[in-house]
Image (cartoon, rainbow, N blue to C red):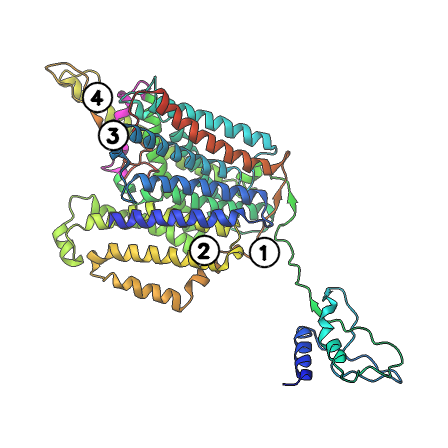
Amino acid sequence: MSKDDTVEEEQEEDVEELPEEEPEPVEEGEEELPEEESEPVEEGVEELPEEESEPVEQEQEEGLEPIIIGLSKPVKKRKAVRRRKKVEPKKGDGELEPFDLKSYFIPKDRNWVLPVFVVIVLLLFGYYMVVFMGVVSETCDAQAEIGDDDCDGYVDNPETSSDDSASDDSDSNNNSTSESSDGDGTDGS
Amino acid sequence: MVEALSVVGALLDGLLLTFILILHLKKDDRTWTQRMGATFMLWFLLCHLGYQWASGAFGYNFQDGGDFVTDLMGVLVWNLWRIGVLAFFLAMFTVPMPWFKKGDTYLKIFVALLIINLLEAWFVHGTPAYSETGWGLWFAMSPAVIIMMIIYTYIGWNFLTSETSGEDNLEKTTDKAGLFAIMAVTLWAGKNWFDWMGIFTEGEMFYSYWPAYAHPFPLFTSLTWNFELVTVGLTLFVLFIGALMHLNKQGSRLLGGFLVFVLFAGMIRYYFYQSESVDYELVGSILNEASVSESFALLTHGVMQSLARPLIILFLCVKFGFVQTNHLPRGSRAMIIMALAGSVSTITEILQPILGISQLVSGFLLGAVLAFEIEKKVLVAMQPPEDDFNPTWIIEGDPKQLERWTNIGFAVFLVVATLMVVIFTDNGVA
């Protein structure tokens, strides 16, 4: 591989991303340089450091015949250009003030959304309360029949008349936020 | 099987915590609400990891460590869970759209919540109110969970029943909030959705009323404990109806189908697990296992509890842009592969004794994931859409300070609430 080949390869790399552009018109007395193009630096492209043209100058120093002799005016230093990365538009949609909570929660075209939800909640919680109070009442009656009037859900020891609710460790395993309440509650691991 | 679930869940928690933390520390063009979202998710992951650890996922039972360690870890774990609840409670009125117009309003609410939880930590675990029945006094956590789930459910209901989608900025906001809300409800109540029939029949919903009469505050403790269970059922029924309407208007089949599936899965689970009329021997002869109930419970309750939660966090973080995965493309790909591999291998392990499926199948499935680059498709599907509506919400004050004070507040709460109980009380706390 000759040195020229090397230069050509490097030049090709430099302009690799450039779109094909028409060569500048060659003025009288000028020689067209085969691989070199002096292009105007357009908006959106950035200049590479001038060291890019070093290989050519190095050849000249090494005694090769300067190929620019005889040009009527100095040739601009070749400037390889590379397209700057496209600046992606920012994802954000600008600044916005929070909507008022009424419009956030109650859609204008569907006024039924909140009332229906409230009805479902009331029905479910109401159903629960009625059944729950019934269960408690039944249990209290059942306890009262055996002489345990504290209605705590635990049957006291009739011999000691003690309140057995405190001695039952089930309370520490039955809170709704406990991880040990396997199967119920809304959290816990 | 149980061990596998908690270990994989804990590993996922730890990996995700690291992954999201690294991405969160990168500088990029996220909005302040997105950064707040990442903060809340990180705190939740820390909390969940703490719980997995405490439940013995890494082979260490802190209750064997002596009284001091037991006390310390007991309170610490509960306080982590309080923060987990608070993280999603705060995210509810911050992340999809702030409900406040002044940063100070957020900070005041935040401090008030921390103080209430601090009091709860003291009265439940410490002197002077600690007692055998003190455990029922969940005046901070239970109401927070109830309120949070009702509001999240309503936001999800609003989204599912909408006839249109993203027609204006308001609807774009409520759409995003709706998806976030459904994921949040699934995370918190999802594991109990499979028990819903039990709740209404033989579960504790009607029959466990112990706090009502065994506590100094019977009515309050009864309401918080029992209504929390009712709320679990409420979320499922409301979202089920919403899912049917969502499917009817050609909405997301994945989302709607999942919610419908859960309701029926609850029925199936009840048939296997809680109904006394099931002939387990007959079922076992068909499905290769006598104790189908245990495996079914693991597939539903267990998977939703250990595996689904970290995966939901991953989905939320990517889908809502809380973090940007393009900072770590290789790491993101690895994270998705690990999440898929962990989930698939755990589920096949549970299915192995029931259906006779060799666990080696999970290896082939993992191979398929890699061969077809499914992880890339999953990651792309999770990314926010190109035209994602992502405004910077304007509030009075410096929104960047909210994230800072949230982190400081949670950290201070964790230290103070834990040490306060351990140092100033002689009572056991675990």
Which amino acid type is marked by label 1?
Answer: Asp
Q: Please give left or right for residue B301 compared with residue B355 in the image.
A: right
Query: At numbered mark 4, what does the secondary structure look like: helix, strand or loop?
Result: loop
Q: Badge 1 is on which residue?
A: B387
Quadrant location of the N terminus of chain A in the rendered image: bottom right
Q: Is residue B348 above or below residue A115?
A: below
Distance from the alpha carbon under mark 3 to that under mark 2:
39 Å
Label 4 crowd bin: few (<14), some (14–19), many (20+), radius 10 Å: many
**Residue A165: assigned label:** 4
Q: Badge 3 is on which residue?
A: B208
Distance from the alpha carbon under mark 2 to that under mark 4:
50 Å
In the rendered image, is residue B161 in sight?
no
**On the same chain: label 3 and label 1?**
yes
x and y percent of residue A89 in the render?
A: 65, 56
Residue under the point 44% across and 54% down: B248
The magenta segment: B199-218
Label 2 crowd bin: few (<14), some (14–19), many (20+), radius 10 Å: some
In the rendered image, is residue B33 in sight?
yes
> Which of the two discs, 2 and 4, sits closer to the camera?
4
Q: Chain of mark 4?
A: A
x and y percent of residue B250 in the render?
A: 46, 57
Work out whether mark 3 precedes mark 1 in sequence or the reverse, and give the earlier one: 3
